[in-house]
């Protein structure tokens, strides 16, 4: 009799184990891909994809990337989100659904903590690397959409011995680094709004490409280097479409034939004879400046960027674009060309260190870039940029630092981007 009870108990326990709840996903989010379609994605802790609960009904997620025991032992899972869904939940993650029309957009990029040889950031200090603070503030803005302009992975080498500012930090293109650099600090905003992700040069084939293609690339399945992320388009209503380009390999200083061909081909996908309403979203700015040294009383000497993109744009029809939205340079900058080409916006302010001679205070100037005069506004502070759609196709923008203090206010009307200190 005792033997029978034990067998019955073991049977019950085995059945319970068979129907045990799957492990909580390590991260979950909603991102927009080509055509504005939405995908739910999740990092499965135990390699088994969880179910997504859509309006109370469970839906199985499929494997996007199989576990890689060496660097990414978790599966990456995805599910296309049908239009009209009102609620989405994956495990304990209650996720946002896309807005029918996007009227409030939050923009930032260059968010990871730099560990690169002798270039070391204090990753353990929330004000020296304030990405988590930026995300907490940004989530409170309740945007309809988040645009990350690239560079998520920065922990490339080990924290130097005896350096307390980053002790215990993971490094290398593997899950713990991506978790520390992006997914854990970004969770408040991942839970608050859908995202559009652009590929940065830190996700190039010599750096963090494995994590990029597994988790964030907009393609239907994970791919491997050598590869480029294909152009994808996200309509956001009101006649505006985000045209997301891959500029990871577009060299800043020189024009390399292979990279030139890639950018040129991507530009050929843009609409011809357009109405000047779309936004080109790409990591490297077509037109930007980097301060390289200071000339005493004469001020800072700047070098213009990006040679590859500028060469590719020669003779191209960019009439559909009102603005290029980028990061790469770790400051905020706006460049207005009086409508003769798309305006350039740079928001590389999410958390990585800036250049030595970046102006901490708002600096307004007239500059000459790639053959045209531009009115510019530049400063280096950590934070994010929030843009609200107004009447008649006008957008108003406000940059806030990681303490929530407004720093600069901008207006985009057509191709005219006017920014002023608050």
Image: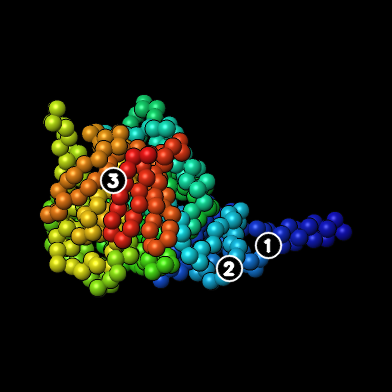
The answer to the question of whether label 1 and label 3 lie on touching residues, with beta carbons closer than 8 A, is: no
Q: x, y percentage for residue 28?
A: 52, 56
Between label 2 and label 1, give the one nearer the viewer.
2
Most extreme residue toward the bottom is 272
Residue assigned mark 1: 19
* SS for callout 2: loop
Q: Of residues 17 and 303, which is closer to you in this image?
A: 303
- Residue 139, given in percent of the width and then of the height, sits at 51, 47
Question: Spatial distance from mark 1 to mark 3, Cα to Cα?
Answer: 54 Å
Of pointers 1 and 3, the one earlier in the residue sequence: 1
Tell me the distance, in whole angstroms, between the alpha carbons under discs 2 and 3: 38 Å
Quarter where residue 224 is shown: bottom left
The x and y percentages for residue 289 are: 20, 45
The residue labelled by disc 2 is: 85
- Mark number for residue 333? 3
- Residue 295 vs 1, above or below: the answer is above
Location of residue 319 with respect to 253 vertically, above or below: below
């Amino acid at each position: 009799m005792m033997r029978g009870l034990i067998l019955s108990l073991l049977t019950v326990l085995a059945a319970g184990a068979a129907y045990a709840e799957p492990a909580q996903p390590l991260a979950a989010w909603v991102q927009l891909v080509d055509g504005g379609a939405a995908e739910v994605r999740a990092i499965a802790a135990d390699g088994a994809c969880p179910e997504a609960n859509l309006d109370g009904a469970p839906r199985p997620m499929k494997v996007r990337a199989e576990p890689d025991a060496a660097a990414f032992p978790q599966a990456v899972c995805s599910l296309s989100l049908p239009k009209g869904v009102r609620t989405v939940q994956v495990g304990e993650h209650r996720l946002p659904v896309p807005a029918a029309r996007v009227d409030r957009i939050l923009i930032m990029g260059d968010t990871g903590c730099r560990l690169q040889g002798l270039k070391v950031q204090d990753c353990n200090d929330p004000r020296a690397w304030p990405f988590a603070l930026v995300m907490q503030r940004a989530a409170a803005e309740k945007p309809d959409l988040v645009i990350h302009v690239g560079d998520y992975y920065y922990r490339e080498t080990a924290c130097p011995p005896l350096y307390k500012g980053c002790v215990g930090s993971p490094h290398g293109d593997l899950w713990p680094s991506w978790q520390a650099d992006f997914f854990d600090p970004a969770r408040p905003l991942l839970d608050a709004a859908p995202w559009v992700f652009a590929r940065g040069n830190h996700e190039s084939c010599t750096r963090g490409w494995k994590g990029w293609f597994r988790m964030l690339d907009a393609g239907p399945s994970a791919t491997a280097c050598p590869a480029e992320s294909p152009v994808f388009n996200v309509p956001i209503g009101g006649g505006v479409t985000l045209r997301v380009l891959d500029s990871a390999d577009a060299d800043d200083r020189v024009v390399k034939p292979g990279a030139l061909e890639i950018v040129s081909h991507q530009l050929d996908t843009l609409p011809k004879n357009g109405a000047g309403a779309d936004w080109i979203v790409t990591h490297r700015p077509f037109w930007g400046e980097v301060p390289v040294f200071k000339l005493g009383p004469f001020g800072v000497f700047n070098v213009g960027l990006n040679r590859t993109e500028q060469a590719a744009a020669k003779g191209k029809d960019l009439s559909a674009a009102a603005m290029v939205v980028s990061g790469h340079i770790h400051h905020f900058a706006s460049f207005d060309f009086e409508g003769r080409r798309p305006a350039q916006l740079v928001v590389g302010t999410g958390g990585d260190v800036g250049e030595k001679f970046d102006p901490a205070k708002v600096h307004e100037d007239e500059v000459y870039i790639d053959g045209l005069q531009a009115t510019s506004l530049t400063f280096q502070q950590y934070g994010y940029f929030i843009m609200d759609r107004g009447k008649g196709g006008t957008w108003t923008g406000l940059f806030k630092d990681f303490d929530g203090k407004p720093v600069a206010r901008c207006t985009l009307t057509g191709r005219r981007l006017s920014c002023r200190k608050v």
